Image (tube, rainbow, N blue to C red):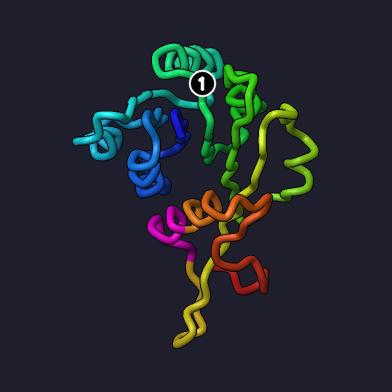
Amino acid sequence: MKHVLVVGGTGMLRDTTLWVAKQARYVSVIGRTEEKMEQVTRGQSNVNAILADYRYEEQLMSKLQEAQRLNGPFDLVIAWVHNVAGKDPLSVIIKSVNNNKEWSLFHVTGSRANLEQIRDSIKVPSHCRYSQVQLGFMIDELSSRSRWLTHEEISKGVIDAINKQKDRYIIGQLEPWDQRP
């Protein structure tokens, strides 16, 4: 991997960002808070910090184009984004990838996401390998209580999805739905 983009890479995907930094020549990571960004970039000479809020589409497009101008096109994009108030940051990210060769997009979604509907609603270029990673929950075997995934479990699952190159990957479980936390 030459250049990887991680959107939301300072929170739940922090460990994913650090793992990718060991695999890729360059990593551009988008985050909103300076403090969290500092924790991810400290000691990582190949990590390009992009302080931005992906809900501001023009700013996002500009910063992604600048990152690619500096370090080349993205070959892998890992994106944990939500559509907010009529905004579609994933489409902006896809449009921003200046790459006419093969690249991969791993789209991380929440447990309520309708994966078929999402896949049908976005326009993925023919030279992009699109994969969905859905976050579920865990049921503790001893107490039979459910809980949401930890940041570590999420990152481990995203890394596993990247390594296995599956079109769909569920971290944890989605069923039984009535037992989610």
Residue at the spot x=55%, y=66% of the render?
172
Residue at the spot x=55%, y=61% of the render?
171
Residue at the spot x=44%, y=29% of the render?
2
Tell me the amino acid under the disc marked 1.
Pro
Whole-percent x, y for residue 148 in the image: 48, 63
Q: Quadrant of residue 131?
A: top right
Which quarter of the image is occupied by the C terminus? bottom right
Closer to the camera in the image, 50 or 33: 50
Range covered by the magenta-colored residues? 148-156
Using a 10 Å C-alpha cutoff, classify the residue at mark 1 as few (fewer than 14 neighbours), some (14 to 19) or many (20 or more): many
Left-right relation of 135 to 49: right
Whole-percent x, y for residue 118 in the image: 73, 41
Asked if residue 143 is positioned above or below residue 131 in the image, the reply reads below
Asked if residue 51 is positioned above or below residue 180 in the image, the reply reads above
Closer to the camera in the image, 48 or 139: 48
Q: Is residue 9 visible?
A: yes
Q: Which residue carries the number 1 mark?
A: 73
